[in-house]
Amino acid sequence: MNVAVLGAGYAGLKVARRLEQELPAHISLTLINDSPTHLVQHELHRTIREPSVVDTIQVSLREVLDSVELIEATVTDVDPGTGVVKLDGDDAPEEFRYDFGAICLGAETAFFGMESVQEQAVPLKRLSHAGQIRDDVLALTESGGDVVVGGAGLSGIQVAGEIAALADERGATDQVSVRLLEMADEVAPGFAPEFQQAIRAELEGAGITVQTGTAVTGATDDSVQTDAGTLPCDRLVWTGGIQGATTMDGDRRTVRADLRLSDSTFVVGDAAKVVDADGEPVPASAASAIREAKTAATNIARLATADSGLEPRLDRYRADIPGWVVSVGNGAVAKLGPQVVSGGPAKAMKATIGAGHLAGVSALRQAAQLAEAERAETRRDETRRDETRRNTPALSPQSIIGGATAPRHRYHSVEMISLANSSIAVSATPTESVRLRNPWAIPG
Ligand SMILES: Cc1cc2nc3c(=O)[nH]c(=O)nc-3n(C[C@H](O)[C@H](O)[C@H](O)COP(=O)(O)OP(=O)(O)OC[C@H]3O[C@@H](n4cnc5c(N)ncnc54)[C@H](O)[C@@H]3O)c2cc1C
């Protein structure tokens, strides 16, 4: 019997690693991906400012998988009914058949038919995109100009933050303007209002112009057209939406809580529009993809090992993500349950997620590297803030907690958030421990 996983992002790598544990040896397990590495996509924006983390966020699949057969090839077609997969790759077969399979091919950038935007803008899905954005922003720090980021979801917020921080590091905040456009009435559409407000505050604090309720309609090489008028623009970054992979005809297939598309095929991660066990739509995110992967792997293992003729009980995915964290340059905002925090603790949580994900897929060397890169960045930021503090005697930092403001005590390099009933996160001096819960941690 053949079990296949198509795509090795968050969903595919997690499904494959779980199936390695759960499938008996006589069932063959194959992972097909168009590159030999797993890309830690939720850290992609960081490479705009910090190209040294490029190697850290690419994990060699061979190094983290044991018994899986790897095929490096592009999936050009997949028939979820028959399990026939067409492949394009130097050493790959033209066709592959599975008895049970998981489609984990992720998503592509959607331009919603705006050809001029597709021609002019750089999306952010690959390392090469981040490299181009960095080069363009560095050129603008010399010549001066306007950067516009279209779309203020998780990626757009973080990209705008990195671009502003890069300009700041180069002493070019006066030369480079950064504007974040969002069609919805708030940034981070779909998230809780107090999280949205805290993110907006962090963005504006970083010198980014946030313009919501404004839809991009087109672009030229020096402007962006919107339904509110034309804006000057020397570099447009487009993070305005996603659609299914070309292989899936641009479609994100809708699956219910068991993640099953047909008798033999499951769809997991951004490739799917998932409706969970409570009937709620699941947001496309890395956090959701790795959690869905657990359900999909369990269900595939049950089907593949079931006695013939017997339909096993399948698990149902219930979206239970305990928190969200977004970085905004040197800052970050986290939502844990009902509480929203910003500043050092949120930044530290963001760091635990990236390193935690790498450690979770056995990329321990890279987890350590990422943690070290975070520490170095924090040290650089501390130095900058010490300088600012020396020059700003009346500093009175405030932190946003649960939508309200509460005092944040600052003791040298210690940042402590006081909550009404409990202290959920403390970022401390090297002599004090930091207690943080990784919001991506998967129970069980
Ligand atoms: C800048 C940025 C910041 C983000 N920040 C966050 C965040 O803070 N939190 C969060 O939860 N999410 C975040 N996301 C979203 C998150 O990265 C995605 O939701 C996540 O990558 C989806 O995982 P996936 O496994 O479904 O797809 P992917 O990670 O995209 O993996 C798809 C895999 O399939 C492979 N593939 C694609 N097509 C083919 C083909 N035809 N043949 C063979 N292989 C193929 C790809 O190479 C890849 O390995 C961010 C995204 C970006 C771009």
Image: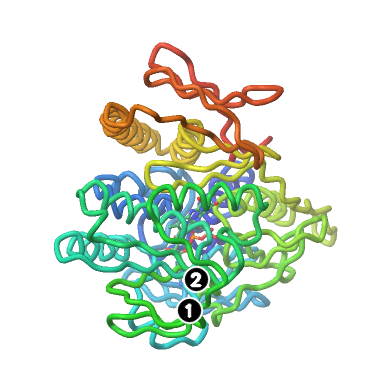
Residue 276 coordinates in the image, percent (x, y): 76, 58
Residue 119 coordinates in the image, percent (x, y): 34, 83
Badges 1 and 2: C-beta atoms under 8 Å apart? yes
Residue 36 coordinates in the image, percent (x, y): 35, 57
Q: Residue furthest front?
A: 394
Q: Residues within 10 Å of mark 1 (few under 14, many from 20)?
A: many
Q: Quadrant of the N terminus?
A: bottom right
Q: Residues within 10 Å of mark 2 (few under 14, many from 20)?
A: many
- Residue 79 vertical placement versus 55 (above, below): below
The residue drawn where x is 25% and y is 57% is 174
Does the rendering let one see residue 391?
yes
Kindly identify the amino acid type of the residue bearing the numbered disc 2: Gly
Q: Nearer the viewer, residue 263 or 200?
A: 200
The residue drawn where x is 53% and y is 74% is 214
Rendered image quadrant of residue 97: bottom right
- Residue 201 vertical placement versus 251 (above, below): above
Q: Nearer the viewer, residue 165 or 33?
A: 165
Q: Nearer the viewer, mark 1 or mark 2?
A: 1
Does the rendering let one see residue 1?
no
Residue 244 coordinates in the image, percent (x, y): 55, 74
Q: Is residue 375 left or right of residue 8?
A: left
The numbered mark at residue 216 is 1
Q: Residue beneath label 2, please?
A: 240
Q: Nearer the viewer, residue 58 or 111?
A: 111
Q: How is the image coloured?
A: rainbow
Kindly identify the amino acid type of the residue bearing the numbered disc 1: Val
Cα gap from disc 1 to disc 2, whole angstroms: 9 Å
